[in-house]
Amino acid sequence: MKKTIKLAVVAALALGTTSVFATNGSALIGMGAKARGMAGVGIGMSHGAESALVNPALITTVKGTEVSFGGTVFMPHVKNTSNGSNANSDNTLNLIPEVSLATNVNNHFYWGVGMWGTGGMGVDYRGNSAQMDMYTNLQLMQFGVPLAYKINGLSIAVTPIVQYGSLDINYNYGGDHGNGTSQDYKWGYNVGIAYQTHGLTVGAIYTSQIDMEYKGILSSTVGPMTNNAYKNNKLSTPASYGAGISYKLGGSTLAFDYKLIKWSNAYGYKDFKWKDQNVYTVGYQYDADTWALRLGYNYAKSPISEQSVTARPTSNGLQGGVINMFNLLGFPAIVQSHVAIGGTYKFSKQTSLDVAYTYALSNSDTYNTTFTTRNGTQPGTMTTKHSQDGVSAQLNYKF
């Protein structure tokens, strides 16, 4: 146990040196290589210790104790065109760690511990004046202790969570705007339920909203675009609801998940008109005992959309053009479709290796970024193109 906790701390330090590009908005799809090999499936299908954060009720499939350690190398590809000038974001390689442990205490009670990189977003256009030298870096990581109870085929669970967040925004427009990096820690929780019988598994989850506050960040960067009317410094991790189902027949398992991410209720995101996301995921697994193959597809419409450009700002000073600019240039959450392939090789009954590759299909949007300041109207248009590659690996040990 002590060794596992030390590994989790190392993973936390690794996350602190990188920025994460996520997929469904700023939420990473899938926790662990098994789930990512199926494009995020996990609400109604168990992945052993990896299930701790997605649906903690499904850690009840663990026999004895299981430890999983690994991560994802994430490679976003973002290109921005502002008023005819092109630039590629220099944020192209990121590391997302994960450590999970789950153990069977007795026939009814299970618990675990884990540390996971769960999401974030970032671009780096420093040195590109047409892109305002925009630099953004949001990092999110969660530490949790899943607690599950099982009776017959029914399992219920809760995971108390401590979330760490870090946010940095900087750009140059009539001067340098930014206030360094701000960090915060807040509590949250996930709850899950699952029922398993004769190869069929159904599950449901709820994840609480976590209201992070990054002192001086949004007010010092968004504020100048609103004649300093924008004062908010909160950026929430949104609540989500979900349900899933899977059916196993022989070595084949077919699974489907649905999740609703409530961006419209989250501080910060609702100011920038992010819409709720309906996330649909389908996955297939073939398990041949000593090896396994996985496939998956994930779709969620982008939570951002072009806002009407008017000279009349909202009550917090935000104009449609400013919203369009920050969303498309600084936080381009425009990818929608993701495909995945993965597999497992079992070296022994105790040790196995999971691998996965995910690809977010390229998507492009063009917004009107015209806005009005005390110095007059600043006309503009902006086009952003975005795709992603991700390679995941996970080493598992059972004892």
Image (spheres, grey):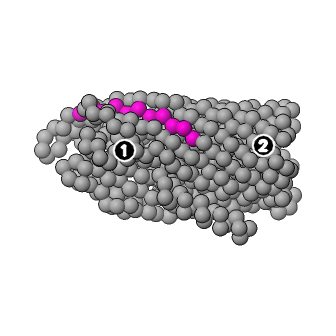
Disc 1/disc 2 C-alpha distance (Å): 40 Å
Q: Residue at x 41, y 29 (%)?
A: 364
Q: Main secondary structure of the magenta part?
A: strand
Secondary structure of the residue carrying numbered label 1: helix
**N-terminal of the two: label 1 or label 2?**
1
At label 2, which amino acid type do we have? Tyr
Secondary structure of the residue carrying numbered label 2: strand
Q: Residue at x 59, y 50 (%)?
A: 207
Q: Which label is found at residue 345?
A: 2
Q: Which label is found at residue 330?
A: 1
Q: Which one is in front, 362 or 235?
A: 362
In the depicted structure, whether residue 383 falls above or below residue 133: above
Residue 251 left/right relative to 119: right
In the depicted structure, whether residue 254 falls above or below residue 192: above
Residue 223 left/right relative to 395: left
In the depicted structure, whether residue 237 falls above or below residue 382: below
Q: Which one is in front, 199 or 128?
A: 128
Q: Residues in magenta?
A: 380-390
Where is residue 18 shown, x and y percent of the image? Answer: 49, 54
Where is residue 212 shown, x and y percent of the image? Answer: 46, 58
Q: Quadrant of the N terminus?
A: bottom right
- Assess disc 2: are there few (<14), some (14-19) or many (≥20) residues with their C-alpha within 10 Å of its C-alpha: some
- For the question of whether residue 49 can be seen, the reply is no
Q: Quadrant of the C terminus?
A: bottom right
Q: Residue at x 75, y 35 (%)?
A: 293
- For the question of whether residue 252 can be seen, the reply is yes
